[in-house]
Image (spheres, rainbow, N blue to C red):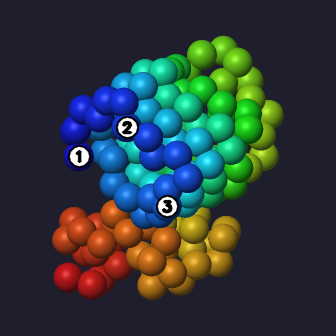
Amino acid sequence: MELKIKGVSFANKDLRGSNFIRCNFIDCDFSLSNLEGVNFEGAIFNNCQFNKANLWGVNFWGADIKGLYGLETTLLKHTNFFRNKMDKSQKEFINRNPNSISLGDYGSFVKYFNKQVGLDDDGILDKFAWLNLPYFLRMFGKQ
């Protein structure tokens, strides 16, 4: 959380379920990476490539995505865009895309993946590894 990450290539990497809350990414490449279930809440992207990345279930809640490039080539499915800073073309693309969602809190996020996607609690905790923290586990009655 809250790291400054500059010039790192995550291209072709499997980062499923990672937690990057409020990280500042500068000149990073996420092209062709598997970002399924990643939490980018509050992250800032400056000149970052996302060409053909898998964004299934990614949480971009409150992120500044103005410097995120290649969004139109990504696999969006259940991708959460809520209160983002974005440019006009990104906003238009997201608004047109039926695979993007806008969920404002973790409770509605979990409920969506349970009711709409059909994941049980263990399936949600598996997909979104970042939910396996004590704070979140209480939502599942696990602590």
Q: Which mark is residue 1?
A: 1
Q: Nearer the viewer, mark 2 or mark 1?
A: 2
Q: Position of residue 60 (x, y in %)?
A: 48, 42
Q: Residues within 10 Å of mark 3 (few under 14, many from 20)?
A: some
Q: Is residue 15 above or below residue 26?
A: below
* Residue 143 visible at all: yes
The answer to which of 73 and 85 lies nearer the viewer is 73
Q: Is residue 28 left or right of residue 56?
A: left
Q: Is residue 9 above or below residue 48?
A: below
Residue at 58% x, 64% y is: 112
Q: Is residue 8 above or below residue 78?
A: above
Residue at 59% x, 42% y is: 31
Q: Position of residue 49 (x, y in %)?
A: 56, 32
Q: Which mark is residue 14?
A: 3
Whether the residues at callouts 2 and 1 have beta carbons within 8 Å, the answer is: no
Total labels drawn = 3
Distance, label 3 to label 2, CA atoms, is: 14 Å
Q: Which mark is residue 64?
A: none
Q: Which mark is residue 8?
A: 2
